[in-house]
Structures are given as C-alpha cells and as structure tokens.
Amino acid sequence: MAATVWINGSLRAADEGGISPFDHGITVGNGVFETMLSCAGTPFAFTRHYQRLQRSAGTMGLSVGSLEELRNASLEVLQANGLVECRARLRITVTGGPAPLGSERGEAGETTLVAASPTAEWGETEDVCVVPYSRNENGALAGVKTTSYGENVVALAAARVKGAGEAIFANTMGELCEGTGSNVFLFSEGLLITPPLTSGCLAGVTRALVIELCEKEGLLVREEAVPVGALAQADEAFLTSTTREVQPIRAVDGVALPGAPGEVTSRIQRAFCALVGEEMDP
C-alpha cells in the first residue's frame, strides 16, 4: 500500500504526486523542514520543532501554517500510515511553491508536505569521520534547517567510503561544528563541551534538551569553540539528533575513543530516555 502524505491541507497517496515540477524546493532547494520522533502516535517536542521551523522559514522568506494545523496534519499522517503503535519518523517540509526556473521567488504560495515512516535503526555506537569540507559560519543559511542538503549528501558519502556512519564538519576557522544531521558533544579533562551556535551549527532540538538535562543532572556544559582535532582527543563523545537521540561516538577517523559509551554519556543517555518517556512536549 502506498504511503499517505498530507499536502496543502489534504491527505493523499504519496504516489499521486501533487507537487509541481516547478516547485522552488525542487528546482533550487528553497525550502525548510523539521524531522520529529513520534512515540505511540504523538510527535516528541513538537512545539520546539515548530518554533525552529518558523525561524528557518523566516530566514528563507517563507510562511508556515499554524502550530495547530501542522500538529493535526501530523497526527492524521501517523494514523493514516498505521504508525501509532510504534516509533516513527515524522517530517514537515515547507517550500517556496511553484516559481520561475531561477532563484527569484514565485507568487503561487508555499507547498507544505507532511510525511512519516518507520524510524531508522541506529547502532549502539557510531564511528565518525572528519571530512575535508567546511561549514561557512558566516553564510546566509548558517544555522538554518533548509532542504539544501547537497553538502551533507556528499560529506556522508565520503564518510561511508571510510567506514564511518557520520561525517563531521569543521567551520572555516577550523573549529568543530557539527555532523551532517547531528550535533556533537565531547567530554575531555572533566569538561563537557559542545560547539556554540556561532560556530555555524544547527540549533538542534535534542542538543538544547541535552544541555537543559545536564543542568538538572548537575553536569556543567560549556558552549565553547574548540579545534576540530579536539574530538579525536576526547575521553568520550556523542552525537545528538532527533532520530539518534544520544548516540556515543566509538571512533574518530578510525581511532577509538577511551569510552564508548563513557560514564558521562551513559548518564545523559539515561536522562534523555527518561525524558522521552515522561514528557512528550518538553
């Protein structure tokens, strides 16, 4: 049975189409999106994801539907696809809609798409590879969750060739920035550090929740710029993302870290798991 999606206000089979070949999201990547984890038919941290969607859309000059409309659309899609008894991956995408074949915006209005699928199965740990490409912390789209993921596709493919499951970017100053779809934390010499948003990394929802959880757990987190090489020197490190949640890093560029998971990472994993089980919209 074909998957069911929600496009501009109505449910339809995914193979029925409904998106213009001239849509600006297709032709030039003019779009923004959010991916959420759904547990038992309820999207986790929906309000935070919606707020970030609004911020990204504002930067791109796009408008998004109301929180209530998109939450209801999400629930409809999860129900229509039989994803209410399991964990699922939910995605809301907003594009510039039909437009000329160029960078200029059109006037037909945005396209909004809501889709869902079963979650990916991640390993207990992940190997990462620092790629020879950089994030531009001064770019127009720095920190914006856009559909322009070409850089991530190329970087992740390069990491996979080297046997890693995630690629790590430095920024133009050689500082640790982020993964293709994840934020990075490292624990070294008794300090838990994550790159600041000024590094050019995405303001991850899971990243923010982990920082808040650490404060509750009495763990000091510093948002601090560090050289990208510091990751391989860490005592332990982990990735955070919507679908990975808190995932320990086992090795960096083929060099194993001392702990995977280490004591600090394991403590944060337990705290995050408890949060997901207790509060669906923290």
Image (cartoon, rainbow, N blue to C red):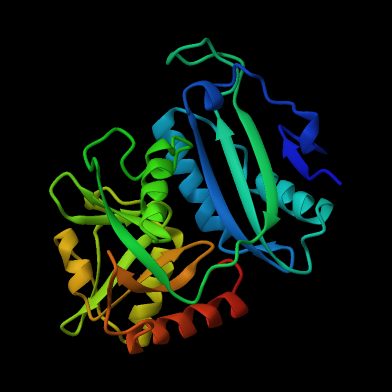
Residue 202, x across and y down, in percent: 36, 51
Residue sitting farthest toward the bottom: 263
In the rendered view, does 234 fall on the left or right side of 143?
A: left
> Can residue 10 be seen?
no
Q: Is residue 35 above or below residue 147?
A: below
Q: Residue at x 43, y 69 (%)?
A: 209
Q: Residue at x 36, y 48 (%)?
A: 158
Residue 161, x across and y down, in percent: 39, 53
Q: Residue at x 69, y 63 (%)?
A: 42
The answer to which quarter of the image holds residue 164 is bottom left
Compare residues 215 and 1 and report the one nearer the observer: 1
Q: Is residue 249 above or below residue 142?
A: below
Residue 139, x across and y down, in percent: 26, 35
In the rendered view, does 14 fall on the left or right side of 61?
A: right
Residue 96, x across and y down, in percent: 54, 25
The answer to which quarter of the image holds residue 146 is top left
Q: Is residue 224 above or below residue 145?
A: below
In the rendered view, does 191 fall on the left or right side of 21?
A: left
Q: Residue at x 54, y 83 (%)?
A: 274
> Can residue 110 be seen?
yes
The answer to which quarter of the image holds residue 224 is bottom left
